[in-house]
Amino acid sequence: MDDKNKKHITSYQTYGIVLVGLLILTFISVGVTWIELGPLTVTVALLVASVKVFIVLTYFMHLKYDSLFIKLMVAGIFILFAVIIVITFLDYWFR
Amino acid sequence: MAHSNPLLEHRDDEGAKIGMWIFIFTEILLFGGLFLVYAVFRNQYSEDFHTAAFELNAFVGTLNTVILLCSSATVAMSITAVLKKDRKTAMILLGITLFLALVFMVNKYFEWSHKIHEGIYPGSELMADLERGELLFFSLYYFMTGLHALHILIGMTILTVILFKVRNGSVNDDKIVLLENGGLYWHLVDLIWIFLFPLLYLIT
C-alpha cells in the first residue's frame, strides 16, 4: 500500500531542461518559416508541433510515470483522431 | 459523520486522474473537430488561407507561445514544490502561472482589437467582401482562438482556487490530486496552443 502511494517527484531541473527544449523547438519552427520550403513548410511545422506535444504529454503531464492504463488511453485517443482525419480526407479525395 | 473520519473517507486518486483524462479526451476531440474543419477548408482554399495567414502577427503569436510554455513549466514545478512540502514556493509558482496567463490574455486583447480596428471581424462589411477562403480563415481564427481563450479563463479560475487550497493546506503533499488535475487542464490549454500557433500564424 505504501509503495502504491509513493509519488515520483520530478526535479525542478528536469522541468527547466524540458522548458528550454520546448522553447528551442518553438524558435526552430519560427525560423523554418523564413526558409522557402514550399509545401514542406506545413509538414515541418506539424512535425515540430507533434514533437512538442509529445514532450508536454510525457514530462509536464507526467505520463512517463503514470500507469500503463492511462498511457494506452491517451495513445488510443490520438490514434482515433488520426483515423478520423484519414477517413475524412479519403472521403474528400475519392468522392 | 463519515467525512470527518479519515478511515471511512472514500478516496481514489488514480480514479480521479483517469476521470480527468477522460474529460481531457472530450476536449481534444472538441478542438480536434475544429482542426478537421481547418484542414478540409485549407485543402480546398489553400491560396486564400495563404494570403489570410499573412495578416496575422507572427511575433505576437510567438510571444504567446513562449508565455504559455513557461506557465506550463511553473505549474509542473508547483507540484514538485508541494511534494517537497515547500508551500511557499508552490504558491509563488502558481502565482507566476496566473500572472503569465494574464499577460497572455492582455496580448490576445490587443491582437483582437487591432484586427477589429482594421475591420476584420465576423459580420463586418470588409469580411463580407473577402474571398471565401479568407473569410473562412478569419472565422476559424476568431472561433478557435476565442474558444482557447475561454479555456485560459477557466484554467485561471481553477488555478486560483487551487492556490488558495495550497495556502490553507487542504492541498498538500498527501492530498495533491486536485493540483495534479488542475495542472493537467493547464497543460491541455498549452497542448492546443502548440497546434494552433503554427496552423494560424506560421503556415503562410
Image (cartoon, coloured by chain):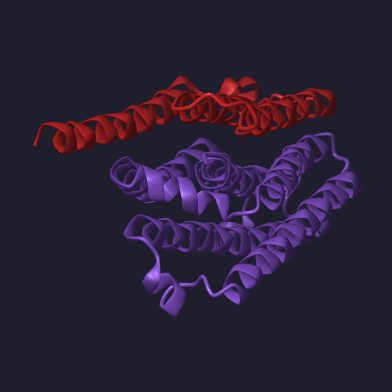
User: Is residue B157 toward the left or the right of residue B169 in the image?
Assistant: left
Which residue sits at x=37%, y=51%? Answer: B34
Residue B89: percent from left, percent from top: 89, 45
Residue B175: percent from left, percent from top: 68, 44
> Would you place residue B15 above or below residue B59 in this image?
above
* The image quarter in which residue B86 lies: top right
* The image quarter in which residue A61 lies: top right
User: For this rendering, which residue is in front, B87 or B137?
Assistant: B137
Residue A47: percent from left, percent from top: 51, 24
User: For this rendering, which residue is in front, B36 or B70?
Assistant: B36
Residue B61: percent from left, percent from top: 66, 49
Colour in which chain A is drawn: red
User: Is residue B89 toward the left or the right of residue B51 in the image?
Assistant: right
Residue B9 visible in the snapshot: no
Which residue sits at x=52%, y=45%? Answer: B196
User: For this rendering, which residue is in front, B202 or A12?
Assistant: B202
Which residue sits at x=56%, y=23%? Answer: A51
Quadrant in which the N terminus of chain B is drawn? bottom right
Q: Which chain is purple?
A: B
Residue B126 visible in the snapshot: yes
